[in-house]
Amino acid sequence: MRAKIRGFTLVELLIVVAIIGLLAAIAIPALTSSIQRARQKRTMAELRAIATAVSSYATDYPFMPKVGPGTADILVPYLVPTYVRHLTGLDGWQHLFYYEADEVSYTLKSFGSDGLAQSSLAFGPTTNFSDDIVISNGVFVQWPDGMQTN
């Protein structure tokens, strides 16, 4: 007697591959969007922490840390370790923050996923991952909100 050979047919294998491809086509865009949203949230948390540290510094001294327009990594001698334990100066996309201050006010910016400054600010919620995230004097003046696009 011959034993019956068991296995999958070509049609069954093609159906399984098509189903896996369909699931991947649905899941990958959602995953990349979730990663970008997580980077935005991390950036907002970092901006809030730096803003709190700058405000605390201004409480102790009669002025804001004046370092000229530039990246927030130059704030390290003023804020670390007294006002914040660790300051990376990098946003969620690993770009440097931008810091600008005069005697009584300051602005912190992240240039978004593309790392390029916007030509004009929207002042309010934005819906694009590449839009700037801006906090001025402890208040967000431009921030991501709602469904985001690239």
Image (tube, helix red, strand yellow):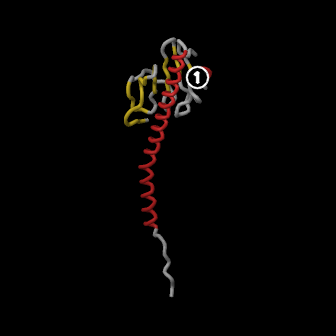
Decide: few, some or many residues near mark 1? Use Cα within 10 Å; few <14, some 14-19, many ≥20. some
Is 36 or 6 nearer to us in this picture? 36
Q: Name the residue located 48 percent from the left edge and 30 percent from the top edge.
A: 112
Q: Which residue: 52% across, 15% down?
A: 101
Q: Residue at x 53, y 12 (%)?
A: 62
61 sits to left or right of 40 = right
Q: Locate the C terminus and report the quarter of the image it occupies.
A: top left
Q: Which residue is mark 1?
A: 79
| Residue at x-position 46% and y-position 24% | 134
For residue 121, above or below residue 41: above
Q: Give the percent coordinates (x, y) of residue 111.
A: 49, 27
| Closest to the observer, 132 or 82 | 82
Q: Residue furthest front?
A: 60
Residue type at numbered disc 1: Leu
Name the secondary structure under disc 1. helix
Report how many numbered discs are placed on residues in the image.
1
Residue 4 coordinates in the image, percent (x, y): 48, 80
Q: Quadrant of residue 124?
A: top left
Q: Position of residue 128 (x, y in %)?
A: 42, 32
For this orientation, the residue located farthest to the right is 77
